Amino acid sequence: ASLAEKGLIEAGEYAALAKTPSAFRAPYPLPPESLEGYLFPETYMIERDRFEPRAFIQRQLNLFNERFMAQHQDGFGKRSLEDIVIMASMIVREEPTEKQRPLVAGILWKRIDSRWNLGVDATSRYELPKWNDRRAFLKKLRDPMDWYNTRLRPGLPPTAIGNPDLSSLEAAAAPVDSPYWYYLHDSDGVLHPSRSVNEHERYRKQYNVY
């Protein structure tokens, strides 16, 4: 949107190109339908008179390789790259503090491995025109046919829900084991993990989180 506002691209041009992964190259597998999740978020220097959106997207994919993939040449164990990227895209939404992200990643992977539903509300917000539209969000939470409803559907969502930063990618790749199964944030954004549903409910009442 910023590039279009400055007249450097046509509105919608970047998004359309990002939905054609076959037009790009990478030394790692790209998803078939959209590059979302692999478009590495960073501050990029550009030349106004020579800006070309296809080349810019390739730069993002190259930096994803340089900053992240090059550090994991042996892969991710039982996880696929796509799994890692999808998980990281949730973590960056779920946990604002970088140092707590590996802990949250550990909780979410433990739910996956134990065949629990993830219950990540950010996934149900993903397709909303307005992220904070509470009425539309609550409707999504009740829709079992919504593929991004991780409260009612098992497993990971079908795609990434954004482009995760490096700390979230690394957290997804190297989660921290813990005794926790649940977590919430208080009004200051502080994480409160819990070991049981009873402990989780006590935190809900204590911090008025519903």
Image: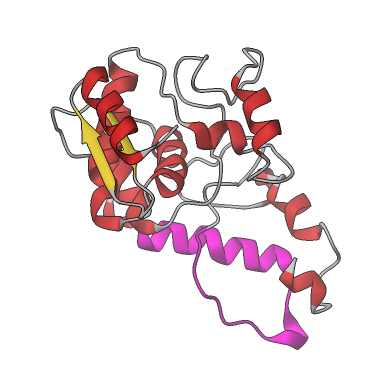
Residue at 46% x, 14% y: name it. 154
Residue at 61% x, 37% y: name it. 125
Query: Total number of numbered labels?
Result: 0
Q: Is residue 41 visible?
A: yes
Side of 3 relative to 46 (left or right): right
- Span highlighted in magenta in the image: 40-68
Residue toward you, 12 or 201: 201
Would you say the magenta stretch is mainly helix, strand or loop? helix
Side of 50 relative to 41 (left or right): right
Q: Is residue 74 visible?
A: no
Quick one: quadrant of the N terminus?
Answer: bottom right
The picture places residue 74, in percent across and down from the top left corner, at: 25, 42
**Residue 49 lies in quadrant:** bottom right
**Residue 165 lies in quadrant:** bottom left
The picture places residue 135, in percent across and down from the top left corner, at: 69, 32
- Residue 146 forms part of the magenta stretch: no
Would you place residue 21 above or below residue 9 in this image? above
Residue toward you, 149 or 167: 149
Would you place residue 29 above or below residue 11 in this image? above
Would you place residue 69 above or below residue 42 in this image? above
